Image (cartoon, rainbow, N blue to C red):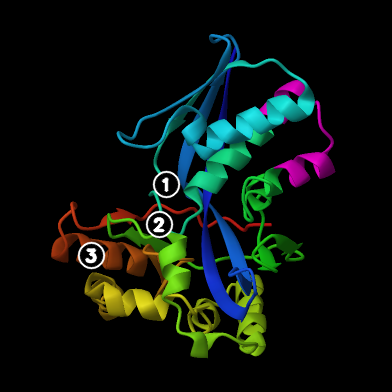
Amino acid sequence: MIEREFSQSKLNLFLKVTARRPDGYHELETLFLPLPYPADVITVDYDGAPGIRVTSSLPGLPENLENLAGRAALAYAEAAGILPSWTIHIEKVIPVAAGMGGGSSDAGAVLRRLNGHFKALPENELARLALTLGADVPFFLYPHVSVATGVGEVFRPVEGMVSPPPLLVVNPNFPVSAKWAYTHLDPARIGNGDREKLEKLLRGLREGDAAMVAGNLHNDLAFALYEKFPLLRMLRDTMKEAGALNAEITGSGPTLYAVCETVEIRRQVAQRVRERFAKETATVFENIPLSPIK
């Protein structure tokens, strides 16, 4: 039997690092916005050879238990008391090490699909299991707009529906690890603040106010990325010059997103990026749905 599951990506429209803990991890306050595109497609074959096998459409991506999706499947099998004979294939669309949650999303999608099939764990146990795999994996079990605190593992869903403005995502086709981004964070940027900006951002999303959303984007990790990788500044500036209201890096980067007032302006911005940068330099994700998100 074969089943499929979509693995959504995410944007961080707001990311404030509030503290550095003695164990080296950072506490933060961040807004997660799930995106139905770009998305990976997870295929699970329950009639494979004994054990767990993970493959991918992307050459060089870790496979089997070296892939987080494989470790998620193993963790589920052990927690549920199941002897697995599963072959999992990942059709990769979400950029890798790009600040869009691709690996965590794949792991969350595998857990969601396995539990939908076997129904062996209640939701609270599934969430606890997801947390052992990574701080943001629980978010991807059932993605919805959320504010995360702690080290990114404490999620507070945003009440009601939000109406994001037209968004354009541009990946510069090179990876950046989260470890690099946090290691190069300027300590002077760490601390509480910008709560008013987050509240305005949430209000803009609820009201469908593109200008309010654009004016309140924030990412403490972006400053070091712009300094280290001039291409990111060039992409940001190109999108703003082409008509985007604002553009910023998501998460630990290096992917950028642009907030546009209309779909037509988004199309113009996407075209300008494609004209100025070769496809080997930047991948443009334009067709992000505009439907309200819960």
Q: Amino acid at mark 2?
A: Ala
**Magenta-colored span:** 114-129
Residue 264 placement (x, y as % from top left): 35, 65
Question: Residue 192: x percent and y percent?
Answer: 65, 87
Circles 1 and 2, Cβ within 8 Å, touching? The answer is: yes
Q: Are marks 3 and 1 in contact (CB under 8 Å)?
A: no
In the rendered image, which residue does mark 1 sit on? 94
Q: Nearer the viewer, residue 28 or 51?
A: 51
* Front in this rendered view, residue 236 or 152: 152
- Residue 245 visible? The answer is no
Label 1 residue SS: loop
Percent from the top left, x then y, of residue 1? 60, 11
Please name the residue that numbered disc 3 is placed on.
273
Q: Is residue 66 above or below residue 49?
A: below
**Label 2 crowd bin: few (<14), some (14–19), many (20+), radius 10 Å:** many
Query: Could you tell whether 222 is left or right of 151 in the image?
Result: left
Callout in the foreground (2, 3): 2
**What amino acid is labelled 1 in the image?**
Ile
Residue at the spot 75% in from the left edge and 22% down from the top edge = 118
Return the residue at label 2: 98
Q: Secondary structure at mark 2?
A: loop
Q: Is residue 35 above or below residue 181?
A: above
Residue drawn at the location 63% of the way across and 84% of the way down: 200
Quadrant in the picture for the C terminus: bottom right
